[in-house]
């Protein structure tokens, strides 16, 4: 049991379980009348409150701010639009191409190796993206692909940024909560564009 705990398997499985509920929660919020602006804004807003409570002035860190503005905020918004356009299943599949994106980008940004196994994974992943885009009548759904890859690239940016800062000594709490305030600063003003009203399910 101690070996399992040390390996990080349990935290990994718990994180995967919690992450898998995001699509369900998003779909429920949409069915309750919320839109992408409310769902993204409230998700960032609630997380920002926790960030301010636990990190206080640490949230002013420039590197954490950059992750929040360029990756966390866009992910929260684009993923909801992806669910709205393509449905929860397809949006989730496209989002989870992020590890493949990370493999490609890490080669150039973090100088990590790109072996044959990783190249095969890239080919299979993008073949799946094309297959998803050709669903239905066989016409390429460029909007579905664009939204899916947009959320995937945003998520990839978070992973790469967190990986780089973790090596620099940032704590798990800082990396998890630090960018949230800046995502909220970016997304909450967009509520002015919303045509729906406040809904508890959007939180």
Image (cartoon, grey):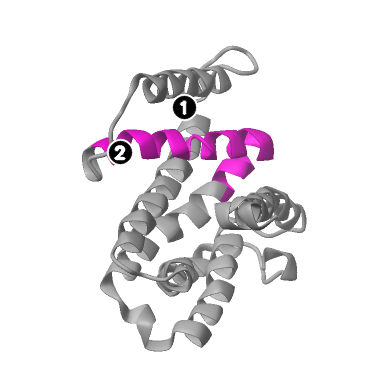
Whether residue 15 can be seen here: no
**Vertical placement of 41 versus 81: above or below?**
below
- 164 to the left or right of 89: left
Q: 127 or 79: nearer the eye?
A: 127
Check if residue 82 falls in the magenta segment: yes
Mark 1 to mark 2 CA distance (whole Å): 22 Å
* Residue at screen point 59% across, 34% down: 93
- Disc 2 on helix, strand or loop? helix
Which label sits in the foreground, 1 or 2? 2
* Residue at screen point 58% across, 66% down: 43
Residue 134: percent from the left, percent from the top? 55, 17
- 35 to the left or right of 124: right
The secondary structure that most of the magenta stretch takes on is helix
Magenta part of the protein: which range? 80-107
Q: 37 or 15: nearer the eye?
A: 15
Count of picture labels: 2
Q: Residues within 10 Å of mark 1 (few under 14, many from 20)?
A: few
Residue marked by disc 1 = 142
Residue 113: percent from the left, percent from the top? 28, 32
Q: Quadrant of the C terminus?
A: bottom right
* Residue at screen point 47% across, 53% down: 75
Whether residue 4 can be seen here: yes
Q: Quadrant of residue 8?
A: bottom right
Residue marked by disc 2 = 105
Check if residue 83 falls in the magenta segment: yes
Q: Residues within 10 Å of mark 2 (few under 14, many from 20)?
A: some
* Residue at screen point 30% across, 40% down: 106
**Vertical placement of 42 versus 4: above or below?**
below
Q: Quadrant of residue 166?
A: bottom left
Q: Earlier in the sequence, mark 1 or mark 2?
A: 2
Q: Quadrant of residue 107?
A: top left
Mark 1 and mark 2 residues within 8 Å of each other at the beta carbon: no
């Amino acid at each position: 049991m101690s070996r399992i705990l040390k390996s990080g398997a349990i935290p990994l499985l718990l994180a995967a379980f919690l992450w898998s509920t995001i699509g369900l929660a998003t779909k429920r919020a949409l069915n309750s009348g919320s839109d992408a602006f409310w769902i993204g804004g409230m998700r960032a807003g609630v997380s920002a409150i926790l960030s301010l409570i636990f990190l206080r002035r640490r949230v002013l860190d420039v590197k954490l701010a950059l992750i929040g503005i360029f990756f966390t905020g866009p992910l929260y918004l684009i993923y909801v639009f992806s669910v709205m356009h393509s449905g929860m299943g397809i949006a989730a599949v496209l989002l989870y191409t992020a590890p493949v994106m990370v493999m490609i980008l890490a080669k150039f940004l973090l100088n990590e190796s790109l072996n044959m196994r990783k190249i095969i994974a890239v080919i299979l992943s993008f073949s799946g993206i094309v297959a998803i885009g050709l669903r239905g009548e066989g016409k390429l759904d460029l909007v579905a692909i664009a939204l899916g890859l947009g959320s995937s690239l945003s998520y990839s940016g978070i992973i790469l940024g967190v990986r780089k800062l973790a090596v620099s000594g940032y704590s798990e709490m800082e990396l998890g909560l630090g960018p949230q305030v800046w995502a909220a600063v970016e997304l909450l003003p967009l509520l002015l564009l919303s045509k729906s009203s406040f809904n508890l399910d959007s939180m």
